Each structure stands twice: as C-alpha cells, then as structure tokens.
Amino acid sequence: MKIENTKAQMRKGVLEYCILSILKNKEAYPSDILGLLKDANLIVVEGTIYPLLTRLKNAELLSYRWEESTSGPPRKYYDITNEGKTFLSDLDQTWADLVKAVKLTTKKS
C-alpha cells in the first residue's frame, strides 16, 4: 500500500468542509478557492474542484452568480447558501468530534 494514496483520500475527505469554510465569509471564484487551498497545503486540481462545486450547488449548499470579465469570459462566483451555512455548522461539530476521537485513539500510552 502506498502512503500517497492514503494521504490523497484523507485530503479528499475534508475538501468539501474546507470549501464551505472558505465561502462562509465571502463569495469566491474557483481559482481563488484553489489558491486558498494551495496556501493551506491542500493541493487540488481544477478537475477535482469543479465537479465538487457543481455537486454542492446541486445540493443547494452553494449558489453562484456570473460576473463579466474585462480580460476574458464571464466568471462564476460561488457563495454559501443559508442551507449551506447550517450544513457547515453541522460539519464543524462533526469535525471537532472526529479530531477528539482521533486524538484519543492515537494518543501514546
């Protein structure tokens, strides 16, 4: 078993949570979201983020708006919905519980 596969699966598991957390304060363009994830050492490619954003939008956790761009095609900006904020609040608690459980489980004796 290769460690890189396990690490990639762990990152994918928290990606939805991270994206919703990024959008809780302000709307963002996908490349901005990718940049923030990269700054946090969560390397994600466009081929991963766009389907995830679409899935979150279809679940009504995100909305989007189009904005004209002077340097190219219109841009789609994503924002979290009220339902998304409620979902994120639940994820915050789930994450806290998970961190606690992992710390207890992996604690050195």
Image: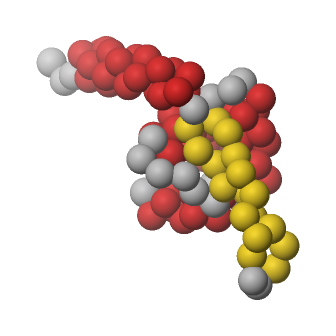
Q: Residue at x 81, y 79 (%)?
A: 72
The percent position of residue 103, horizontal first and vertical second, equals: 26, 23
Which image quarter: residue 74? bottom right
Left of 57 or right of it: where is 44?
left
The residue positioned farthest toward the bottom in the image shown: 71
Left of 106 or right of it: where is 50?
right
Q: Is residue 13 visible?
A: no
Looking at the image, residue 98 lies above or below residue 5: above
Q: Residue at x 62, y 29 (%)?
A: 61
Q: Residue at x 72, y 34 (%)?
A: 57
Q: Is residue 100 visible?
A: yes
The percent position of residue 2, horizontal first and vertical second, equals: 63, 41
Which image quarter: residue 59? top right
In the picture, the quarter occupied by the C terminus is top left
The percent position of residue 19, horizontal first and vertical second, equals: 54, 43
**Relative depth, front residue between 21 and 39:** 21
In the picture, the quarter occupied by the N terminus is top right
Left of 22 or right of it: where is 100?
left
The residue positioned farthest toward the right in the image shown: 73
Q: Residue at x 75, y 83 (%)?
A: 70
